[in-house]
């Protein structure tokens, strides 16, 4: 089963543009995490935001969390061709159950 | 410690055979997760351990799947009587509590 749902499913942009991906989840969470996966490779952790945080930055990444709407967004600024990958959100819920992933957003950045 | 290690990286098996995969987590991590991923989909949760205790198992997991984590260190995932629908990438991850999870490169299973 998957708790999170990313939107859009696919996104195509030009280098230098910003990319925004959204994630919705169902249950109350302790934290929400974003991961990247390059084609045929393993998942790489990008950023974790806790339930008492509203915004977090890491380099060109900005994540927001709205617990009232059960949603999060990932913004990648000044995108590069190397950002081409699938991006997943994953939530760790308050019941202490497993980290559950969404279906992902496939980002294509063309030069 | 160089990260989460999975073995083998690839496995081709005939339908009906049993297979076993191994995962070695980051040593100080108490949680270990198993996921399955098919093309174009997100990782699908299978089961997870906190130390040696198996705390949760997906309802989607049939009785043909079993996982162990003896002594709270490495873990094995066994699939009995494999079916073609079991073909997928099997991912292992570990974490300290519910903090960020670190993934291995996965074991790609092909059932022919």
Image (cartoon, coloured by chain):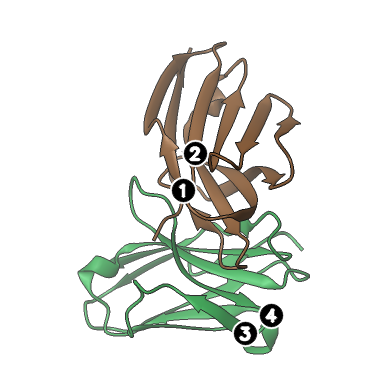
Chain colours: A brown, B green
Q: Would you say A61 lies left or right of B90 here?
A: right
Marks 4, 1: nearer the viewer:
1
- Both labels 4 and 1 in a single chain: no
Specify few, some or many for label 4: CA neighbours under 10 Å numbering under 14, 14-19, or 20 or more.
some
Please tell me the numbered disc located at residue A4: 1
The tag on residue B51 is 4
According to the picture, the residue beneath numbered tag 2 turns out to be A23
> Which element carries disc 2, helix, strand or loop?
strand
Q: Which residue is mark 3?
A: B53
| Chain ID of residue with mark 1 | A
Q: Secondary structure at mark 4?
A: loop
Front label number (2 vs 3): 2
Q: Decide which of B78, B45 is in the foreground and name it.
A: B45
**Distance Cα–Cα, label 3 vs label 4:** 6 Å
Q: Residue at x 73, y 30 (%)?
A: A57
Mark 2 touches mark 1? (CB < 8 Å) = yes
Indicate the position of residue A74 as horizontal and vertical percent values. 58, 31
| Residue A59 in the figure: left or right of residue B59 | right
**Residues beneath discs 3 and 4 located on the same chain:** yes
């Amino acid at each position: 089963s998957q708790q999170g749902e990313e939107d859009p499913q696919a996104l195509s942009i030009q280098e230098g543009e910003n990319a925004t991906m959204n994630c919705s989840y169902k249950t109350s969470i302790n934290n929400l995490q974003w991961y990247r996966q390059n084609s045929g490779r393993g998942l790489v952790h990008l950023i974790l935001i806790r339930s008492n945080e509203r915004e977090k930055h890491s380099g060109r990444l900005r994540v927001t969390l709205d617990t009232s709407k059960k949603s999060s967004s990932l913004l990648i600024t000044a995108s590069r061709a190397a950002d081409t990958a699938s991006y997943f959100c994953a939530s760790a819920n308050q019941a202490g159950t497993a980290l559950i992933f969404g279906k992902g957003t496939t980002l294509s950045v063309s030069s | 410690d160089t990260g989460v290690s999975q073995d083998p990286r690839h496995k081709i098996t005939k339908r009906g055979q049993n297979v076993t995969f191994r995962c070695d987590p980051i040593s100080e991590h108490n949680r270990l997760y198993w996921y399955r991923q098919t093309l174009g989909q997100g990782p699908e949760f299978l089961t997870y351990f906190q130390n040696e205790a198996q705390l949760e198992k997906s309802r989607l997991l049939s009785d043909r799947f079993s996982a162990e984590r003896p002594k709270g260190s490495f873990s094995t995932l066994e699939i009995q009587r494999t079916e073609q629908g079991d073909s997928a990438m099997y991912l292992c991850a570990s974490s300290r509590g519910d903090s960020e999870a670190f993934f291995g490169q996965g074991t790609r299973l092909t059932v022919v």
